[in-house]
Amino acid sequence: MRQFGFSVGRVYSRAGSLVAPPHQTDPLPKKGKRIDDWSGPSSLVAMPKTARVLFATAQFCLLISGAAGLVYEIDWARYLALFLGHTSYAVVAVLVAFMGGLALGNLWFGARADRTPRPLALYAWLEIGIGIYALAFPFYYEFCHRAYVVLTRGLQTGSAGSLGLKFGFSLLTILLPTVLMGGTLPVLVKLVTRSLGELRHRVSDLYFINSAGAVAGCFLADFWWIPTFGLEATILAAAGMNLLVGAVALCVSNWAGEGTVLVADTSAAPASPEEPTFTSRELRLAVIAIGVSGFVAMLYEVVWTRMLALALGSSTHAFSLMLITFISGIALGAWLVGRWKKLRRSMEAFAWAEIALGLAVFVSMFFYELLPYWFANLANLLARQEAAYPLYEALQTLICFAVMFVPTLCLGMTLPLVSRIATAELARTGRSVGAVFSVNTLGTVLGAAVTGLWLMPTLGLARTFALGITMNLSVGLVILSRAQAKFRRALLIAVPLLALGLIGFADARFDDIWRHTLTMGLWRALGAPVSASVFRTQASTDLIKYFRDGAGATVCVSAWRVGTTDHLVLKVNGKPDASTADDLVTQLLLGHTPLLLKPSAQQALVIGLGSGMTCGAIMCHPSIQHLDAVEISPEVVEAARVFEAHNHNVLTNSRVRVVVEDAKSFLQITDKKYDVIISEPSNPWMAGVAGVFSREYYENCRARLNRGGLMTQWIHSYESSNESLEIVLATFRSVFPYFGVWQGSLGDLILVGSTQPYGVDLNQLEQRFQAPAVREDLERIDIFRVPVFLARELISPANAPFVPPTNALVHSDFYPVLEYVAQKAFFLRGHANLCSQYDETLSPRPMTLLAQYLANHQLADMEFKAFAVFNAERRATDPAFARSVLLRWQSDVPEATAPVELAAKLQNPNAVAELESERMAKHRAQILNGTTGGQLELLRLYGEVLLRTYRAQRSAVLVPAADDLQAALGRLMELDPPNRRIYQLRLAELAWDRSDDPTCFKLARTALDPDPATSGRINFALEPRLAAHVMARMTETLWRKRRISEAWALCQEAERSGFLGKQNPLNDPLLDLMYRKIESELIAGAPAAQKN
């Protein structure tokens, strides 16, 4: 929402409106006048008590209402985006409704403020009205949401009717409170003017306090209330702030006796001889200048926001920090004008402020190309630890201030200067302030809309900056030459020439280098170039194939050459979202996986077009009759054409329809149903993206799925954390309780879920795999055989739903926890290993499709080679599994030399243990038969290296020979009684791996016998998690045999023994998973997971 300055417009428009008009002041209150009509000297000490109380009340009200106003703007923007979407036109519709309401309120209540004898009471009732509306807003919003969905269902997306309804519902939802908000400003200014007289610097203090409140509101909303309490609680808290302000103002009004004595004398006072007077032409010029100032302010705010998003990353907090910086600069500029007590020539001062603003922006443009370099170097000074995260955000704020502070300071000075000119009569203070604010608001609306929808997509960042500079300089020159006709005529020629010259210069000097430096995405790098020259050199190496500064994002396709191959990468706001290299495996498997699991699918929906390669993969399947691809950015659709050679030219396929629309809005208004929905958005730490990971989003997807349809979701484990991944999995599970986890490229996960258990026919899967187009497409990512594809399944539907804890947080549109957790995880640059803990490819008894396949198929030499080719070319498999496959190949085909060579090239963390076990095997008999203390230690070491080697080699395709290990463990049971139970548990583990369940249970129960007299005490120090691991395997065995009551008894025994709990050093994650699985079945009274 804030990409068009939605949150800053209202605060910016206040800057000039709180400056008291020049008028004659009275040293003492006259007889017959109310005390709050006294216009005293500047000294607050000299004020009567009532005046001081009124001034303090105004300060308090403006501080709290300023904070509440920003909270509302941020909160309402989120609410409305839930059904109107985040498209450019939807954002403009909300912006116009919000700012239009403020303008109407200022005009109407501004005129009324001049006539009311009780301005503070009127202000109080306005605040109370806003608070009451906010209390009812969650219920009213739900009504509007449902009405919108009913009225738009079936409408063509992007049609005039659809856009009209978005605008209408924007008005319907927030017009009333924004009109009331717009009325508060002129009413309070009238109070200050009538009560405190010409206290310019005091009124400027009020504005500064109001802006401080706005900054505080932004911090409260985005950094505390929304992530902690959610949208509804946040809006209720803001309502409480309004009601508090209203109650205080009403009490003070009654205490001061507003309206109980003679009506104030509001006749126009003669101007002070020291104050300049202005002609009606100059007054009109001043009002026009306010509108132009608003336009240019929003032009800069929109372009700065985009530029800083490219340089710093476009997270939610980054946008908030930009907004805070913008407001702070403007507020300080207005405050400085209030300190300028001897200012006499307001028009000239305004002109020079405009010129200074333009020059400041022009000079700063020469440094923008280095912002990514500076930020990366500063950010890399910080340790990637949670305690340093606030410092990271402080660095982002520092960069924002470096870019915007001087220009916004100048910008903040322009509005109070013009307000001094426009508000020249005491009797018309409210009306004048209302008119000034309305024109300025109109300028901000036009500036945000025109810049975002037209100027920036047409001109680009650099040329749009140049146009804004031209407008600043032109306004200044017009005002300076207002009394000289010949200069005004010359400006008619000079201004167009100035615009062309500046735009041409910006194109030649900045446009190309910004395309390269700002789209590098250096904010993601853990290392930074050693110098600015190296940075520029690295940036210039990419060949730009496509570039567009769109209304919603800057989209770029660049290429780099590796050998004779050009690799393409699609970047959105500097973040790579698709490529023909590293991301290829994920992009193709996102399309092929659900359609191989459900070969009968005919209707498909892809959310997030990207490069179009996922859509191309889908269209390889002959059963697909129609595919809808929903993409929020039209520039991405254009960019996808650059990938034609890689996406099978899918955009020209007659069975494919591309819809440019917000995904959530599309899902709510379409009445079409699909067999497969594939969601591949960007990362959830990117601003606005977390919405397509929410429970409500998945509910909308579920409503559009046919019975038995599959929902497929991409998520990453890189630059993430287990907490983030748990939230995603728990949210997905809350709507699609039956799902499995597949692996794309390393670090990419693919969730495939449904509302009911989905069986997979392996014969049909093999037939579809052999379809010529499907097979050829999969061969692009070196998947030549069915088992290679099946090995991409990490966690089966039997286990995946129970990976996240039962009480894991669920990400909701109304409680958006994921985007904040994900932002912090991105800073920490960690890797979520949650799914790795349950990776069934490394289990000798998995419940995956690969296990089903291997139960009926013997791997042939060509299949082993296919595994080897995929692992060698794509490096998208856990090295431990890849090595295990090679060892199985070597075991099945002893004469083959390829597995030996390939295994030697693989990363092997267990190489030392393997070498030691082979070396010690030469002395096996001596080690096993030794009885001395020294021999016992050697035997322990031998057992350890054998065990480490065994565990590193076992997988879904290989159970290694363990004769030596069993012999060593048996001998250790005799010679090392204190650790006998641990050795028994290790033998139980080996028995379970070989499906020898009776032996496993016998050994385990002996080892876990609570009577110390049986086998002594368990020495957990030797292997703390082993007991929990074996109990997890025993529980799994009982679950597979449907002996649920016995399995639950074992879970309870584990709980009593203290083996459960994520932070428990004795815990094994598999035991917690089994506990949740068994508990779920008992609660449901029926099988809660698919049994493979």
Image (cartoon, helix red, strand yellow):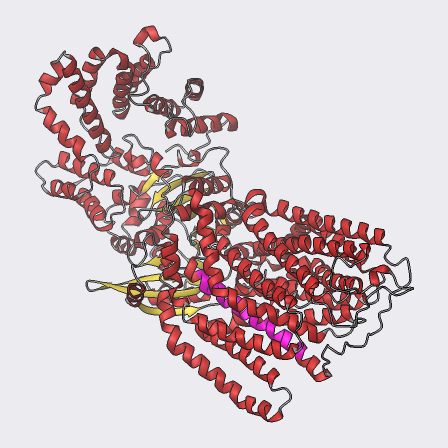
The answer to which quarter of the image holds residue 97 is bottom right
Vertical comparison of 689 with 708: above or below: below
Residue 358 higher or lower than 956, as above or below:
below
Occupied quadrant, residue 174: bottom right
Percent position of residue 834, x then y: 38, 38
Can you name the residue that lies furthest to the bottom here?
Answer: 486
**Which of the image's four quarters has the C terminus?**
top left
Between 86 and 645, the one lying in front of the other is: 86
Q: How many dots with numbers?
A: 0
The chief SS type of the magenta part is: helix
Q: Is residue 619 visible?
A: no
Q: Is 383 rendered above or below residue 910?
A: below
**Image spot of residue 673 (x, y percent):** 50, 52
Magenta highlight range: 286-309
Towards the viewer: 325 or 1048? 325
Q: Is residue 328 magenta?
A: no
Residue that appears at 46% across and 83% down: 500
The x and y percentages for residue 94 are 61, 62
- Does the segment drawn in magenta span residue 303? yes
Q: Quadrant of residue 555?
A: bottom left
Asked whether the viewer can see residue 52, the reply is yes
Residue depicted at 46% across the width and 33% down the height? 805
Q: Is residue 509 left or right of residue 419?
A: left
> In what quadrant of the picture does the N terminus appear?
bottom right
Q: Residue furthest top?
A: 1013
Nearest to the observer: residue 489 or residue 104: 489
Tell whether 397 sits left or right of 563: right
* Residue 33 relative to residue 895: left or right: right
Q: Nearer the viewer, residue 982 or 29?
A: 29
